[in-house]
Structures are given as C-alpha cells and as structure tokens.
Image (cartoon, grey):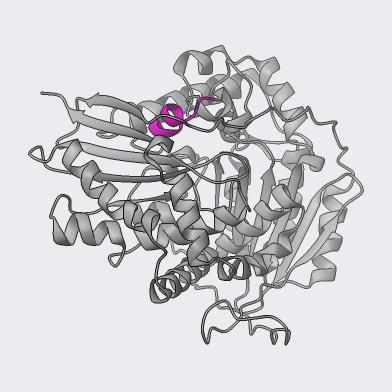
Amino acid sequence: MMRFTRLAATGLVAGTLACTGPQATVRPDKPVEAQEASPTPPPAPAEAAPTTQGARRFQVPVEYHKLDNGLKVVLSRDTSAPKVAVGVYYNIGFRIEPKDRTGFAHLFEHMMFQGSKNLGKMEFVRLVQANGGVLNGSTRFDFTNYFEIVPSHALETMLWAEADRMRGLAVTQENLVNQQGVVKNEVKVNVLNQPYGGFPWLDMPQLANSNWYNAHNFYGDLEDLDAATLEDVQSFFKTYYAPNNAVVVLVGDFESQQALAWVKKYFNDIPAVPQPPQPDIREPRQEKMKRSEKVDALAQRPALALAYHMPPRNSPEYWAMGLLHQILLEGKDSALYQNLVQQKGLTGDVAGGTNLLGNMYNYNGPMLWTLSLFHDADKSPETLLSAIDESIEKVRTSPVDAATLERARIKARSELYGQMEAIFGFGTADLLASFALFDDDPARINRLEDELAKVTPELIQKTAQEYLRPDNRTLLVVKPKS
C-alpha cells in the first residue's frame, strides 16, 4: 500500500486508493535499507534571500525535456546511493473521470498491472522484483502514477517495461472482469467493512463540494464498476495513457545523457493522441456552513471532522494557508493540539491537512483543508466546535507574532524535506512530476521555500478571515450505532 508522509503520520486510510495485493505492491524479501542523502547544494545566488533565518538553501538538480510526441521528461541526478526512482505520471485522476463511471480511474490503475505487449500478466511485477526493486501505483485527484525504485543498473530495463505498457496494455475482457472483482472487494474490505471507513478522506469531498467532478465517490459506486465495458476501458487507455498526457521522471544515480537517450529510444515512437477538453472543476464560494451526520455501526467512539475550502493553488493566500496549517494543526505545538488536547482534554489528538491523499503541492484544482478527531461520548460536537473556533478565531482577529510565523516556516520547510525523502526518496520524484504535469515547470520545486518566505502576518490574517470563516466549512459528525 502506498502512503505519503502525511498519511502515515495521521493514520488515515487514504492510501487504500493505491492498488493492493500482489499485482500492485511488491517488495523483495530483504528491502533496500537505503536513505536518500541530499546532494551538496550549489551556493545560492547573492540576491536570493534565505527562506528562514540562517537556513541553508537546498537545491534539487532538475533537467527538463520534451520529446517530439509530447512526453515530458524530468531528470534529477543524485549519486549518493546506487539506485534510481522511475515514475510515470498520467494526467488523469478520479476528479475528471467520466460521469456515471465513478471509480473508473482507479479501476484502470489496476488494469495497468495485467500485462502488456511483451510482458505477460504479473511479469512486470516479477521483473522489478528480480532486480531487487519495489513498485506501486496510485490514483489521486489529478493524476494516476506508477513507480519503481531499483538499483541503478536496472534503469534501462524499467524504462523499456514502462514504455511497453504505455504502448500496448493487455486490455481484455478477462482482465477487466477480474479487476472489477478486485476493486469491488477492495472497496468492501478497506471502506465498507472498516470502522470509520472513508472518514474523512472519502466522505468530506462528497459533502463539502458541489461540483460533481469534485464531489462524487471517487472510490467508485459498485454499480458503476459493474457497468464498465471493455470498450470503455480500451477507449480510456487510448485517450489518457498517451505520451502527450504523461511525464517520465527519473531521480537517482544515472548519467543524464545516457538516461535521456534511453527514454527517447523506448518512448519516442509512441504516437501522441488528441486530448479531450478539460471539464470545468471550479467550486463556487461557499456561503453557508454545511452539517452532516453519519452513523457508523462499526465505530466505538464518536468522531468529528471539519473541512474548509482552500484558496486557489499558487495564489498568495494558498501559501498563507500552508503556514496556517503549521500554526493551527501540525505538531504538538500547534494551537489546536494545545487547546483541545493539552488544555481542555477533549480528545487525544487532532490531525489533518491540505489534500489528505497527498500533500499541499501535488494536486491541481479545488481542495479542502481538513481536520479530524475522535472523542468520548460525553463530549458533544458543540463543545468541540466551540474549542476549535476559539483557536481559529485568534488567527482571524489579530496578526500572528514574528516568532510564531518563523516557527511555522521552519516546520513547513522540515515537512517539505520529509516529503522529498519519503518512500526511499521517491517523494522528490512525486513533486517533480506534479509540477511538470500541472505547471510545465518542475524546477519550481526549488522555489517553494521562497513562496513561503513571502508570507506576512497581515496576509495570514487576511487569509484566515476569508477561508477559515464559519460559512466556508463543512462539519461531519460520526456517531456509533446505539
């Protein structure tokens, strides 16, 4: 199961959208025990201000290329360990999957492990395993990704294998029926038959959003999964799994010129395919608080979650929300933890963040900032909501002090580096691929700290006043079955 840093830290089960079972996640008997070491960064330009007081500027090497067929290629060389992360990202996630085909993007992620032109069923997995590597795939809001982390000598083999399934996946009726059953079982096991299944990562987008593309059950309604036809799957593959809708990213120990030559050798002759217009995924401004209740027959304790609509991605307010998250919710020094846990004893923990299926950087559309907690039955939702408001209103009514702001920047910087190092260093590849897909600019990975450094106390207060207002939130109360 693939989990990004935030998911592992909060215990959320959002990672279940990744493929599970032997066809998706394979690790050798003795996993590679290697930690990505940062290359020595080049000196910062004289005119560039540090992101935090006395902080050392970190630079990720980035080479960016585009093939004749539109395939984006990102290379980031790091010779600190003899391994390479290979990622192939397709610009299709469950946010824009076809209507009446909920869960289709996720279903197709499973199909990608069922064989290709030159590799039979399960042979892709065995190939990675034989080379001492790990692999996985996942479906997210705005992309579907596949990756392998292998010893450096296996790089060419992995590029050949990824190109083979981009060129000719084995889309058959037998494979479709088989994977429909696998996905339906995954939904039942990981959501329907679990206490707090889908809370809040699957529940909240459906409750807080009003645009179907953002609000449908992206795990998939069982009826829609059954209705998928072979023609649907073949059309989906031909349209979205095209080189001009994809990024290949390499991070690790390789010679850049040779690596690029291999990418061209195996991918350049795959033809581009015209892409359909992107649907309108905008969300209207929320003008009234929404409240929902959910009875969970398997839950032992009540739970509560709040979700606020985020500012537009890459706006000044977006960066301010990134720091507000650090101030309010991240860590035991956060305002909400101190108030709800340490001072009032209303809960044992409070968790959440922006984009519960990833992080604040790897999405491209409307998003929610969510917090959630579990509590004893003698604590009412109104009591908890009052305490939450008490903490949030402080950042809405007055600017944060300089020390609080600097601490938030340091925490955000630390979290960013943690994301880069996640999954044997694959987190860096994830950010590079996301910025190539969404911004056509993978090098922006080296400007994230600069954007955080621009945030002022005044901007934080202004952002909190607009985006943390009560009318902009959705409340979900989970009650155990009595």
The single residue placed furthest to the left in the displayed view is 378
In depth, the one of 126 and 197 nearer the eye is 197
Quadrant of the rendered structure where residue 175 is? top right
Location of residue 99 in the rendering, given as x and y in whole percent from the top left corner: 61, 18
Residue at the location (57% across, 71% down)? Answer: 453
Q: 180 left or right of 167?
A: left
In depth, the one of 423 and 363 nearer the eye is 363
Magenta span covers which residues? 202-210
**Magenta: main secondary structure:** helix
Answer whether residue 292 is visible to the viewer in this image.
yes
Quadrant of the rendered structure where residue 202 is? top left
Task: Decide whether residue 208 is among the magenta residues.
Answer: yes
Q: 195 left or right of 458?
A: left
Residue at the location (66% across, 72% down)? Answer: 60
Location of residue 89 in the rendering, given as x and y in whole percent from the top left corner: 67, 46
Residue at the location (42% across, 64% down)? Answer: 399
Task: Decide whether residue 117 is among the magenta residues.
Answer: no
The single residue placed furthest to the right in the displayed view is 68
Residue at the location (74% across, 22% down)? Answer: 235
Location of residue 271 in the rendering, given as x and y in whole percent from the top left corner: 88, 37
Please, is residue 34 above or below residue 466 in the view? below
Quarter of the image where the C terminus is located: top left
Location of residue 109 in the rendering, given as x and y in whole percent from the top left corner: 59, 35
Please, is residue 13 above or below residue 257 in the view? above
